[in-house]
Image (tube, rainbow, N blue to C red):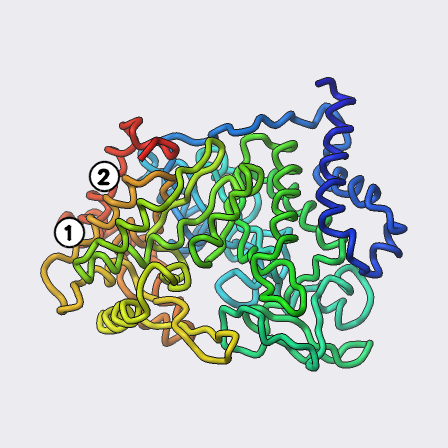
């Protein structure tokens, strides 16, 4: 296909998705900014990714695997390790090169932007690096040695952002970026991951508005019925690609499109938007990877593969609760049954396997896979091991456990019968299973280090998730990692050995038949 034909095809493909998304939408911005002409929106998206020069377009190839058995991702905050003299991003880079260069190929840098709450997931400014962490030069330096995954926090931003300030003022960029509703609207069907009220009363220049907040009242939801929001995130994607991103984690993307009278989760137009962003990204950077973060029941999660035209990879959210339940219950039947039911990922798609991350152990993905009484027993045992429980409000107003907050090493202290001497063996067993499964493995930095529950941090922040978000002072970490008798040395040494075995065997290719 020549350049002219390819450019025309790209525009036509973009328009196909835009019609699917906006044909029945009546947002004022469509008329005011685009004269109700979706071809103008398509042109704006092409410019946003700098694809208007045909020589800058790549021709994507379907069903290409951009990974192999050597790929191992470490999940970390920019400041999970710090010292008193260097920006944390530089300290993290030094730690990787010193201790993990022979096993880690990819790094998921959790949100490193200026933020107001939720440890980075309430973004104030998407275009800058938090000065407390470093700058874009530090990110670019890291990207020269490791594949980097950036978070695209696409459902919401900070209530302290300039965009939301402009919303309150009624003018300027962002003044029409946010989702509102009336307290009289029926929102009883809306699926919530939190117990706070859905709508946030906000005084604006246009009077009292009620802003949609899927998560917290500091996290205000975007209104994607406005195509300017769609275009703005295309610009952000381009900025990230130009600054070292080769993977994108679409945070909380299942909640992106809202329609009153529905659950407002996993709606068709959410899937269409992901497909559109994939189309744009793969024309800009053919080897870039989209991973959807959809902490939802298993069958709904699988839908984000599309027909190998949506997410390249999906988080295997059912794995952590099922695997940990197996270890503490000493019963593998639920895990085995689930594994046997999982369809092989097509070429060009993969499961993203993990056991622990910056968040807790999600329990919604265990729905339908573990009986309610089994989940309750798991919750009780994790509480016995000093874990915390986060709750959500169901459509009927009842509350149920949403996630278990606990360090993985503490989750492996024992069984339902109590603590025992098999903590390290149980911890390594969990990772042996995870690393042997079909998919791309992701390992949380605190799993590599055997970091235990940070109860003091929970007390300081008042947030349950802080239990698994410890910050290591580099010299203290270096000391324990040079002590062959320390738990942290033992765990890291065993984990590196295990990962090296995986990386040397082609049978562990993420798409190998299992």
Q: Residue furthest top?
A: 2
Q: Quadrant of the N terminus?
A: top right
**Residue depicted at 49% across the width and 44% down the height:** 149
Q: Under tag 1, what secondary structure?
A: helix
Q: Residues within 10 Å of mark 1 (few under 14, many from 20)?
A: few
Residue most extreme to the left: 421
| x and y percentages locating residue 270 in the rendered image | 62, 53
The one nearer the camera, 492 or 188, is 188
Query: Is 23 placed left or right of 406 in the picture?
Result: right
Report which quarter residue 380 is drawn in: bottom left
For the C terminus, the quadrant is top left
Residue 52 location, x and y as percent? 77, 32
Residue 469 in sight: no
Q: Secondary structure at mark 2?
A: helix
Q: Is residue 412 left or right of residue 321?
A: left
Crowd tier of the residue under label 2, counting other residues whose Cα lies within 10 Å: few below 14, some 14–19, many 20 or above: some
| Mark sitting earlier along the chain (1/2) | 1
Q: CA distance from mark 1 to mark 2?
A: 13 Å
Q: Residue at x 80, y 80 (%)?
A: 207
- Residue 376 lies, with reference to residue 115, above or below; the image says below
At x 53%, y 70%, the residue is: 192
Q: Position of residue 477 (x, y in %)?
A: 28, 53
Query: Which residue corresponds to mark 1?
Result: 425
Label number found at residue 72: none
Residue that label 2 marks: 498
């Amino acid at each position: 296909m020549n350049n002219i034909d390819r450019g025309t095809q790209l525009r036509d493909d973009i328009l196909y998705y835009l019609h699917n998304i906006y044909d029945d939408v009546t947002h004022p911005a469509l008329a005011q900014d685009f004269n109700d002409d979706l071809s103008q929106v398509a042109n704006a998206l092409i410019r946003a990714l700098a694809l208007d020069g045909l020589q800058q377009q790549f021709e994507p190839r379907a069903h290409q695997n951009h990974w192999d058995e050597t790929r191992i991702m470490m999940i970390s905050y920019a400041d999970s390790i710090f010292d008193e003299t260097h920006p944390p991003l530089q300290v993290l880079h030094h730690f990787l090169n010193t201790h993990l260069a022979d096993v880690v190929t990819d790094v998921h840098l959790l949100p490193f932007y200026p933020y107001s709450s939720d440890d980075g997931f309430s973004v104030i400014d998407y275009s800058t690096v938090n000065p407390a962490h470093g700058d874009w030069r530090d990110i670019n330096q890291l990207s020269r040695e490791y594949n980097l995954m950036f978070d695209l926090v696409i459902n919401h931003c900070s209530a302290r952002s300039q965009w939301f300030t402009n919303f309150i003022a009624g003018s300027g960029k962002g003044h029409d970026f946010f989702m509102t509703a009336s307290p009289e609207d029926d929102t009883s069907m809306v699926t919530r991951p939190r117990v706070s009220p859905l709508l946030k009363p906000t005084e604006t220049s246009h009077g009292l508005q009620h802003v949609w907040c899927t998560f917290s009242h500091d996290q205000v939801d975007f209104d994607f019925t406005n195509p300017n929001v769609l275009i703005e995130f295309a610009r952000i994607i381009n900025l990230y690609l130009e600054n070292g991103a080769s993977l994108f984690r679409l945070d909380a993307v299942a909640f992106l499109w809202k329609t009153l009278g529905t659950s407002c989760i996993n709606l068709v137009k959410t899937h269409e938007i992901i497909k559109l962003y994939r189309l744009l990204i793969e024309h800009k950077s053919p080897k870039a990877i989209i991973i959807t973060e959809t902490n939802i029941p298993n069958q709904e999660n699988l839908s984000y593969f599309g027909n190998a035209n949506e997410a390249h990879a999906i988080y295997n959210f059912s794995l952590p609760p099922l695997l940990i339940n197996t270890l503490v219950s000493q019963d593998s039947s639920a895990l085995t049954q689930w594994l046997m039911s999982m369809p092989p990922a097509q070429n060009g798609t993969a499961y993203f396997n993990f056991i622990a991350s910056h968040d807790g152990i999600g329990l919604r993905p265990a729905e339908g896979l573990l009986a309610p009484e089994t989940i309750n027993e798991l919750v009780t045992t994790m509480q016995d091991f000093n874990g915390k429980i986060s709750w959500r409000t169901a459509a009927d107003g009842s509350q149920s456990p949403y996630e278990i907050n606990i360090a993985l090493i503490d989750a492996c202290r024992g069984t339902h019968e109590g603590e025992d001497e098999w903590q390290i063996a149980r911890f390594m067993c969990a990772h042996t299973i995870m690393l042997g499964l079909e998919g791309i493995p992701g390992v949380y930095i605190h799993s590599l280090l055997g970091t235990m529950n940070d109860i003091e941090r929970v007390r300081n922040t008042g947030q349950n998730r802080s239990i698994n978000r410890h910050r290591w002072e580099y010299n203290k970490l270096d000391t324990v990692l040079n002590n062959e008798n320390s738990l942290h040395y033992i765990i890291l040494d065993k984990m590196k050995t295990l990962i090296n075995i995986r990386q040397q065997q082609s049978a562990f290719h993420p798409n190998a038949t299992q």
